[in-house]
Amino acid sequence: MPRRRRLGARLLLLAAAALLPFGCCEAFLRLADPADFGELEDRERFSATVLEHVEVDGRRVLRLVPGAVGHYLGHEVRISRQRLRNPEVEVPKPAAVFRLVVLGDSVPFGWGVGEADPFPRRLEALLQQRPRRDGRRYEVVNAGSPGWGLAEEFHWLRDEGMAFAPDLVLHCIINNDVEPHPKAPPLFLGETLRRVRTLRLVERLADVLTKDRGCEPNTGLTPEMLVFALDQFHGLLAPAKVPYVVFDTVGLPPLAVEHAARLGVHRFDTVLSLEWQHRHQVTRSDFHPGPEGHRILAERALAAILPLLEP
């Protein structure tokens, strides 16, 4: 019995010796948070609140949760019953309204900024300072949704957006709509273990050690794919005589640019450099534009569509 007690005491001592530095590391990561894990956890909670997977044409896609209310970076985000970060859109469209639909992903959605800051809202404010000769008022519908790509944007416009009777569609295309997706980090923690920041640190170190893992195959869009996508959007909007404006922030390849010109698609070149993105990102660990970035995007969007509003 004394030998067993001594062995048990030694095992307890060994466990304490291992847990003490683990506990100190966990306390440091929670108090100082040098790795911004608190923001990451807030981001995950926010995503789980406002986003869900639904079936569209046999594919699981991310859609906003109707009626959801989430919080991120101190901002309240409200989702309408129409699954948009936008006031309810009146259908059919009132005769006194000139309606613009801004189509895209988390950038026009306004990831990380307040209700008045997404560039579609700022664009609406700029337009309302320019009364139309026909007396109609401008209305901008924010049809941006996190996680969307060109396919999801086309399906939404075809199945739901055209019912809004847009007078103009401004399509915001960003880099991850076109470029190959980097391979996912080697996540090995379950939902419960991800709450332990020390384990998350180990996971992040594993990610850093494998940072040259390349891109997922067949995730980027070739110039031919972009030509096909332009044909689809143009074919949807042209019969309704709705101007289609491509807000090109990534720099489309020459083949797609030339094809857009042949179709009569209005393309506005507003490439966002890496330096611009870093200067205007909403936090040091979140690349989405902050309020100043959205102000600049709204001014560029106004320049893109102004010649089409009252020719």
Image: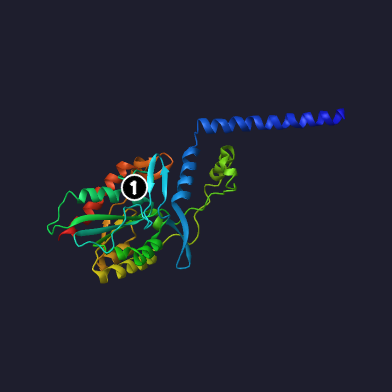
The C terminus lies in which quarter of the figure?
bottom left
Where residue 256 sits, quadrant-wise, is bottom left
Q: Amino acid at mark 1?
A: Ser
Residue at mark 1: 273
For the point 42% across and 42% down, the residue is: 72
The N terminus lies in which quarter of the figure?
top right
Badge 1 local density, few (<14 within 10 Å), some, or many (20+)? few
In percent of width and height, residue 84 lies at 36, 55
Query: Quick one: 77 or 175, which is closer to the camera?
Result: 77
Query: Quick one: 235 or 174, which is closer to the camera?
Result: 235
Relative placement, left or right, of 236 versus 98 is: right
In percent of width and height, residue 54 lies at 47, 61
For the point 41% across and 39% down, the residue is: 284
In percent of width and height, residue 69 lies at 41, 48
In percent of width and height, residue 232 lies at 34, 68
For the point 47% across and 55% down, the residue is: 52
Where residue 150 sits, quadrant-wise, is bottom left
